[in-house]
Amino acid sequence: MEIKPFILLVSIFYLLHSSSSIRSSSSSNSPDAPDDASSTPTSPDGSSSTPASPDAGSSMPDAPDETSTNPASPDADESSPESPYASVDKTPIAPAEGPSATFSFPSKGSKSSPELEKICQTTKLPIECVKYVSLFLNNSVKIEPITVAMTGIRAATEMTKQAIETATKFMDEPGASASLKEAMSTCLENYQSIPDDNDLAIQALDKRNPKEASFKLSSSLTSMDTCFDGISQMRITSPMRDMESELERLLRINLELVSDMEKS
């Protein structure tokens, strides 16, 4: 009768021990329930310390500052030097020292006619066309596009010869400046090629080849453009400015007359 209480106590102890072992095993095998007391590090003074989050750590590299690393836009640098090729000569053009030289035209010429005016209307300078051609046109010549064009070319040749004489005079003057001499030399060199080109243009028209004539007249006009460029580079006012303008206009008229024949 005294053994039964002892057995009962042993059984209760055994059951309590088994229950405790099961709970301990279950706690150690569960990943979702860590032991806060064992996993939290403590500081030397006994208080617990929580690891800092990644955002607060100093070991994380800072994001680059885009405002300091991006190269500056080309438009932002307004102090960059200008290209030397864009430089413009701002030297003042020397004023004219007197009136311009002019052409000496024949005192007699043919009167204007409706036929001549009609042909000259095909150009961009009809008034000048009538003026120059009528001065060198004979009354016996039949007015038609080819004769008007050939008369204008011959007139341009006569005007070019006067321009050559005048340019030589200005270039050889003792008091002429170096800039004037250089400009007149450039014009003189280009004037001298115009009569030959004009003669070849007339020969082409005789052969009814307006295309070849247009090519030669274009060369004459290019010679005038080169003369103007030389004067501009020397920054002077040409003493032949009126003669140069009239000759350039007549050369342009002749080219338009022949180009119109090429279309027909």
Image (cartoon, rainbow, N blue to C red):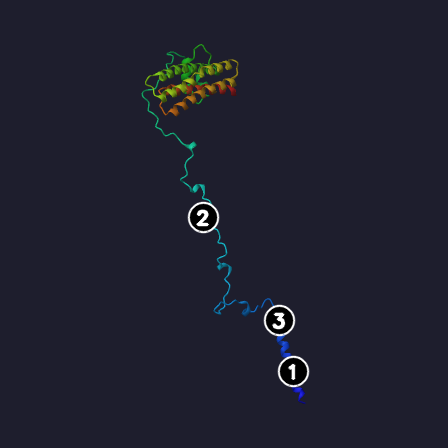
Q: Could you tell me how far apart the alpha carbons at marks 1 and 2 are, in whole angstroms? A: 80 Å
Q: Position of residue 10 (x, y in %)?
A: 65, 82
**Secondary structure of the residue carrying numbered label 1:** helix
**Amino acid type, callout 3:** Ser
Q: Quadrant of residue 81?
A: top left
Name the residue beneath numbered marker 2: 68
Residue 62, labelled with which disc?
A: none
Q: Residues within 10 Å of mark 3 (few under 14, many from 20)?
A: few
Q: Residue at x 65, y 84 (%)?
A: 8
User: Which mark lies nearer to you, 1 or 3?
Assistant: 1
In this orientation, which residue lies closer to the viewer: 186 or 263? 186
Q: Nearer the viewer, residue 231 or 204?
A: 231
Name, please, the residue furthest toward the bottom.
1
Q: Secondary structure at mark 3?
A: helix
Vertical side of 34 occupied by 251: above or below: above
What residue is shown at x 39% (from left), y 25% (from top)? 233
Of tags 1 and 2, which is closer to the observer?
1
Task: Measure the C-alpha gap from mark 3 to mark 2.
Answer: 57 Å
> Residue flagged by tag 1: what amino acid is it?
Val
SS at mark 2 in the image: helix
Q: Mark 3 — residue?
A: 26
Q: Residue 198 in the image: x percent, y percent?
A: 46, 15
Label at residue 10:
1
**Image quarter of the N terminus:** bottom right
- Residue lying at the far front of the rendered structure: 44
Using a 10 Å C-alpha cutoff, classify the residue at mark 2 as few (fewer than 14 neighbours), some (14 to 19) or many (20 or more): few
In this rendering, is residue 19 above or below 173? below
**Looking at the image, do the residues carrying marks 1 and 2 touch, with CB atoms under 8 Å apart?**
no
Q: Who's the residue at 64% across and 79% down the image?
A: 15
Crowd around label 1: few <14 · some 14–19 · many ≥20 (10 Å): few
Please report whichever mark, 3 or 2, sits nearer to the chain's N-terminal start.
Answer: 3
Q: Quadrant of residue 9?
A: bottom right
